[in-house]
């Protein structure tokens, strides 16, 4: 059963951004499944790596757009992205060293973080874009 889902309230009105956000939650959910079903550490690590890589790609694309539109909140938004990336990278490293398993707490943290970031920070960007109309 799916636990982490994209919600209607996350809609940004940009099909590409929405598709990327949907994929982030789908990957998070895949990770949840892998952890719950008790798949091997390699499988869990693989999904975590995929999630990290896709998150990096998504953040990068958002930053390119923000630069293009000369978004005034670019630096702060970028700092938020970097903070999450640092956290997930750290989790992946400790996981790879065998010091930690991927926990529901990490999934909850990422789910909450992504949801809040989309609702607050990504929304500000989309408002800025529609305001330029
Ligand atoms: Fe985003
Ligand atoms: Fe963002």
Image: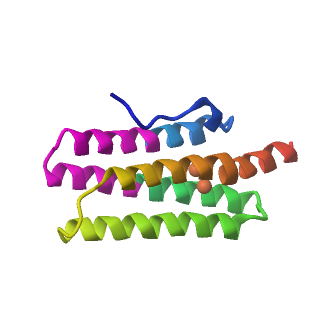
User: Taking 118 as reference, is 20 left or right?
Assistant: left
Vertical position of residue 32 compared to residue 96: above or below: above
Q: Residue furthest front?
A: 105
Q: Is residue 121 above or below residue 92?
A: above
Q: Quick one: 107 or 65, which is closer to the camera?
A: 107
Question: Which x, y percent locates residue 19?
Answer: 52, 37
The image shows residue 98 at horizontal and vertical percentages of 17, 68
Q: Quadrant of residue 77?
A: bottom right
Quarter that holds the N terminus: top left
- Measuring 64% from the left and 34% from the top, which residue is drawn there? 9
Q: Which residues are magenta?
A: 24-53
Number of marks in the rendered image: 0
Q: Position of residue 16 (x, y in %)?
A: 58, 39
In the picture, which quadrant includes the C terminus? Answer: top right
Magenta-span inclusion, residue 54? no
Q: Would you identify the image quadrant in which residue 36 lies? A: top left
125 horizontally vs 45: left or right:
right
In percent of width and height, residue 72 lies at 79, 65
Q: Is residue 37 magenta?
A: yes
Vertical order, 80 against 11 (above or below): below
The majority secondary structure of the magenta stretch comes to: helix
Residue 70, quarter of the rendered image: bottom right
Extreme residue in the left direction: 40
Scheme of colours in the image: rainbow
Residues 84 and 125: in front is 84
Whether residue 102 is situated above or below residue 5 in the rendered picture: below
Name the residue rendered at 42%, 52% in the picture.
54
- Residue at the spot x=52%, y=49% of the render? 112
> Between 54 and 25, which is closer to the camera in this rendering?
25
Relative to 58, 87 lies left or right: left
């Amino acid at each position: 059963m799916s636990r982490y889902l994209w919600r209607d309230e996350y809609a940004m009105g940009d099909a590409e951004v929405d598709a990327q956000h949907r994929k982030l939650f789908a990957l998070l959910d895949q990770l949840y499944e892998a952890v719950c079903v008790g798949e091997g550490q390699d499988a869990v690590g693989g999904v975590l790596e995929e999630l990290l890589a896709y998150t990096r790609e998504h953040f990068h694309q958002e930053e390119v757009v923000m630069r293009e539109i000369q978004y005034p909140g670019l630096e702060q938004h970028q700092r938020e992205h970097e903070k999450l990336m640092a956290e997930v990278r750290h989790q992946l490293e400790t996981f790879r060293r065998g010091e930690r398993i991927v926990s529901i707490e990490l999934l909850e943290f990422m789910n909450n973080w992504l949801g809040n970031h989309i609702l607050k920070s990504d929304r500000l960007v989309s408002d800025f874009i529609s305001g330029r109309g």
